[in-house]
Image: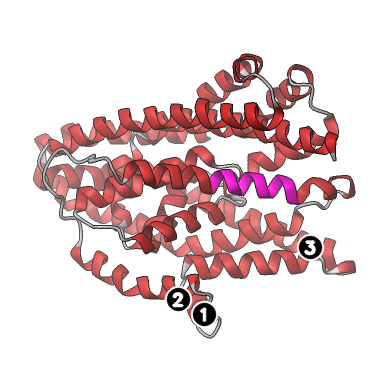
Amino acid sequence: MQKKLSLWMLIAFLLAIPFAFYLPELAIQVKFLGTYFISILKYFVPFLIFGTITYSVASFGSNASAVKIVPLTLGLYLSTTFIAISYALLLGSNINFNTGEIINLSSEIVASNEVNLGSTLSVLAIDLTNIFRLISEGNPIAIMILSILLGITIRFSGKYENKLQEIFSYFNDLVLKSVNYIMFLAPIAIFSLFSNLLATIDGAIMFSLIKFILLTIIIFLIYMFFFYGAIVKLVTKCSPYDFFKKIKEPIIFAFFSSSSSATMPLTLNTANKNLGIRKEVSSFVVPIGATVNMDGSAIYLGLSAIFISQLIGLELSLAEYVIISMTATIGSIGAAGVPSVALVMMTIVFTSVGIPIEAIAIIAGIDRFLDMFRTAINVTGDLTISKVVDYFNKIG
């Protein structure tokens, strides 16, 4: 389903170009289709955050044999995700992606989101007196904090643990299936929003998109080979060249499949046979990585936020960069089970810093192409962390 959906989103993206060019008046009128889709998706976002994060945290380390390596594994995955988005924001903030004029999307939405920025910052300050009000308002960071705390509580709830995990498993499945069905409408939304956008702006946005794609790929490759290579060399004392040579099969498969889950059997086999990682380590670290390791997506989210903010003339402050880092890092927990995960997480990140989520239509059409690179990075990260955890487990 994921591949077909991505293909239809790409087709919708391409069809929107001639439609906006030959029928600009009609392109403006069909915007309501995309607006309705965005409204529905926004309604499910709080439930999505709550369900995926609570269940994932509650189920971590439920296998007794894996308890010893849980803190190290999760710590490494979340640390690399935070480093990834920090790296993206640092580089992206010094790049001018926009080659044309500033786009005016929706001043009303920007204004309404700016009002909520103070609420987001209050959560960063751990203002517990307001957290329940913020949760009722659908504030993403507040919901993430509640979900993590509830997940930890369930994990250590004794005899009620299994039953509570089962309840949240059903809830999580229900939310994911609902979002899955909603995402079937994504191509229609992309077609209406992007055609409307093209009908109301100049063609310079296409040059900006091309520049964004090329620079994003370069930033992806630098992180993948230099950052992971440095970890392998400095921590495990292995040759980065030998490491990448041994894991080339899962990287190639991940690139063309765009699915960490589909690559998992090959990833596990490579970890055990090619890298010599013990099965008790790889059988835990790799599946966890498929759930929480989102380094590629984190880089993409950071660069996308900067790219869109430049297109619409919205200056991001240091506090908003921090918010992007936090939402992308914390939101990575459990998000890998979501269809078109990057687009859904983009909704969360954009909402947190006042970027109109209608702007997602600008890059939704190229998401499938960049997803190939993101997945390759994620799988490389899974094998890198597996190697590191195995190394520390041996010497510990």
Q: Amino acid at mark 2?
A: Ser
Residue at the spot x=53%, y=32% of the render?
A: 227
How is the structure coloured here? secondary structure
**Left or right placement of residue 109 versus residue 83 in this view:** left
Residue at the spot x=53%, y=40% of the render?
A: 295
Q: Which residue is mark 3?
A: 155
Can you say whether 142 is above or below 100 in the image?
below
Circle nearer the N terminus (2, 1): 2
**Left or right placement of residue 283 versus residue 253 in this view:** right
State if disc 2 and disc 3 touch (CB < 8 Å).
no
User: What segment carries the magenta color?
Assistant: 71-81
The label shown at residue 211 is none
Label 1: state its secondary structure. loop
Q: Residues within 10 Å of mark 2 (few under 14, many from 20)?
A: some
Label 3 vs label 2, nearer the camera: 2
Circle nearer the N terminus (1, 3): 1
Q: Which residue is mark 1?
A: 127
Circle nearer the N terminus (3, 2): 2
Residue at the spot x=36%, y=33% of the render?
A: 216
Q: Nearer the viewer, residue 213 or 174?
A: 213
Can you say whether 310 is above or below 228 in the image?
below
Q: Which residue is mark 2?
A: 122
